[in-house]
Image (tube, rainbow, N blue to C red):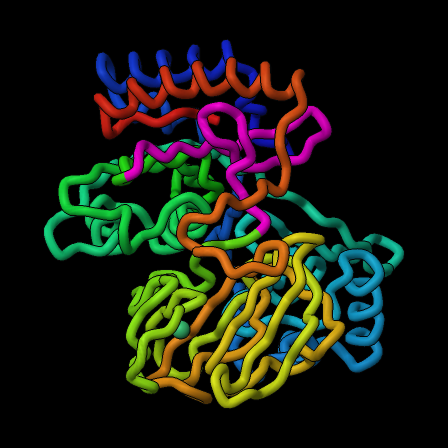
Amino acid sequence: MKKAKNILNMRNLVHVVIIVAAFLAGIAAALVIAKNSGVGIHNDSDSHTVVVDVASGDTLTSLLTDQGFTTADVLVIADVLKDGADISSLRAERDKIEFIRPEPDADVSQIVIIPSPWRRVELTCNDAGDWECKTVDIERDTRAVYRTGEIMDGDSFYLAGARAGIPDGILAEVYDLLAFEMDFERDVRAGQHFSVLYEENFSDGKKIDNGRVLAVQFQALRGNVQMYRFRKDDGKTGYYDENGNGAIKSLKRTPINNARITSSFSNSRKHPVLGYTRAHKGVDFRASTGTPIPAAGAGRVVARGYNSGHGNYIKIRHNSSFETLYAHMSRFAKGVVVGTNVKQGQTIGYVGSTGLSTGPHLHYEIIKDGRHVNPMTVKLPAISNLGRADKERFLEYRRVLDDGIKQLAQHPDWFIQM
Ligand SMILES: [Zn+2]
């Protein structure tokens, strides 16, 4: 596959924005789109080709048998497919399979399995009668598009994002990113603006899917939050703030996306069940019973049990200074026990109302060096920061990308050809 052009090539980037801009402004969008012909999947309506969308209950054997293959043929083809493409079964509602015959009544000479819009696996019967397997990556045409939105009265970030035309999957990713920096409950107000630069993938001029989030900006109450996706010299990519500091933190302030805070961290509050004042050493997020609870960060489960206050709870140790605790769970996730190593975002249990609780919610604590801290304000360590050389490249990249974004902001129909 031709890799998407490295957008770290700054000069190219600016050049392309300007070219695209010129095309769209002066001539016609068709000029840009016309560049994308000649690649992609061709489902010609040729009568020698049968295209099957794999449905529930279909198996490779049943589909091959339907096309006239014998049991012996099926076994050979299954073997070649396993060896050549590591495919041992078909996925309903996802895979497509094509059977191609040289003549309408001839035997099938080529079988094409299409497991994704970007990959086809071609099985071809050669002159000797042996099946050969080849995987072909489909070239994609990737464009970075820019969307901007505003929070209206009574709005959630999701509603405002949807109104701005940002697809659900991209919005969820953006939320995840911003949640490292922002407290959506306290930082989001009507009148605030946000923007997202993300990829759209095209094949044969048709949009197929969305790609990665490249840049995010949110005018939060506590200041402008900016994040950029950047590839380091060692090939690893990450998100960094405008100064090149790692934006992905080792812990999340809000483990459950889009959950409302019903009770904040405080050193003294009236307890809703006990009635007297005592410290609330965590943050409560309202969520319905059964909502999955993701681990706030990677770590090892150091406690899993029940006590009358916390109900079912889990405690995770993340590093030498940070631990997190999750309480009132209805149940634990299967296989998560003391000693389990969990990844950031891995489901560890489900929201409930066990222990001292007035209704289903997640009670979440962050413990730093043995002391409870406010999850919404504690400074969290970044997972990766940039070395000096990477940082210099990042700052140059950011300057150029910001220039591109400025142009896109003025011309919502333009895009950056990647
Ligand atoms: Zn609580």
Does residue 412 show up magenta in the picture?
no
The segment highlighted magenta reads 222-250
Question: Closer to the camera, 171 or 277?
Answer: 277
Q: Horizontal and vertical percent for residue 181?
A: 42, 43
On the picture, is 231 further left or further right than 403? right
On the picture, is 361 further left or further right than 389? left
Q: Residue at x 34, y 23 (%)?
A: 405
Q: Which picture quadrant has residue 231?
A: top right
Classify 115 as above or below 380: below
Q: Residue at x 59, y 57 (%)?
A: 297
Q: Residue at x 63, y 67 (%)?
A: 316
Visible residue check, residue 98: yes
Q: Which picture quadrant has residue 362?
A: bottom left
Classify 375 as above or below 231: below
Classify 198 as above or below 24: below
Q: How many marks?
A: 0
Classify 400 as above or below 379: above
Q: Which picture quadrant has residue 191?
A: top left
Q: Horizontal and vertical percent for residue 124?
A: 75, 55
Does residue 226 show up magenta in the picture?
yes
On the picture, is 101 further left or further right than 153? right
Question: Closer to the camera, 30 or 46?
Answer: 30
